[in-house]
Amino acid sequence: MNSCLYKATVMHHRLAPKVHKFHYDIFMFYLDLDEIDELSKKLKWMSRNAFNLFNFRDKDHLQFPAETPDQTKNTRQHITDYLAGKGIIIGKGRIMLLTNLCTLGYQFNPVSFYFCYDEDNKPVCSLVEICNTFKEMKPYFLGAETREENRYKLNIPKYFYVSPFIDMDTRFDFDLEIPDEKLRIKIDDYSKEGDRFFISTLSGERKPLTDKTLLFYFLSFPLITLKVIGLIHWQAIKLWMKKLPYHKKESNKHLQKEVLRPYNSS
């Protein structure tokens, strides 16, 4: 099977206006979207749209159309629809998804990555799915023109409220290596003046996806999705204590564009 796990380390390094750096260990699923049903039957600790230690919920990922998502379609169907809208037809080509799964009923996914292939198993494109703490979601598309051998690279305006300590008129710089035995992903932030002020990396090693490894990682990283949201708020408190400028979500709404599931603050 193509699906596996990655034991990984997340690193964030803020360079300005004040230095702030941390890292923590996690694990992530790397799933062939065509294998999820089979995996949910084969594995005791993983399911699809049903309570378990780890549950892949289609509703946690991109769904279209944005205003009234078609709930009858699964994640693969939604992604292929999205790609078709960009003129990309992958047929039966595989779609790999690097993500966290709902853990004991709780889910929060700051970022997920899709790597899409054609029917000849050649890389076609990548899609980054970013979710903020308001449960808003935004896709960033990296097409064939952004691929350099085994990686996708793109510098693009963010136009999304990700952190209250970062302006929305900044730019994401994606550097995504197609996962293999090693996982190497880098997302930096650049100011509108072109200065890099934030570095984030995700690096890890491939591990087998079995009941044994699932149970081991569940015990090693208990309630990992709750841990992720907890760490986000803990680091936010540290940044607040360092007196970094705080940007309210209600400010600069014109810089929040193409957002799926927009949060209603009224």
Image (cartoon, rainbow, N blue to C red):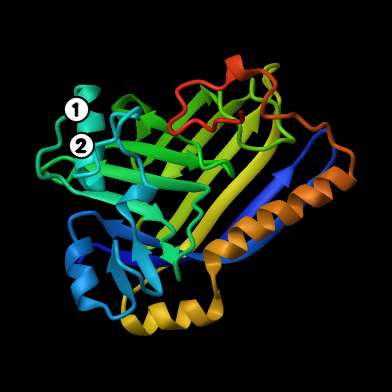
Q: Which of 155 and 241 is in front in this view?
A: 241
Nearer-the-camera pick, 247 or 239:
247
> Picture coordinates of residue 161 (x, y %)?
61, 31
- Residue visible at 64% across and 20% down in the picture: 169
**Quadrant of the rendering where the N terminus is positioned:** bottom left
**Visible in this render: residue 123?**
no
Total label count? 2
Q: Mark number for residue 80?
A: 2
Q: Report crowding for label 1: few under 14, some 14 to 19, many 20 or more residues within 10 A (C-alpha).
A: few
Going by the image, does 42 lie left or right of 262?
A: left
Q: Is mark 2 on a helix, strand or loop?
A: helix
Q: Name the amino acid type tagged 1.
A: Ala
Assign the C terminus to one quadrant of the image: top right
Residue 95 visible within the image: yes
Residue 112 vs 181, above or below: the answer is: above
| x 36%, y 37%: residue | 127
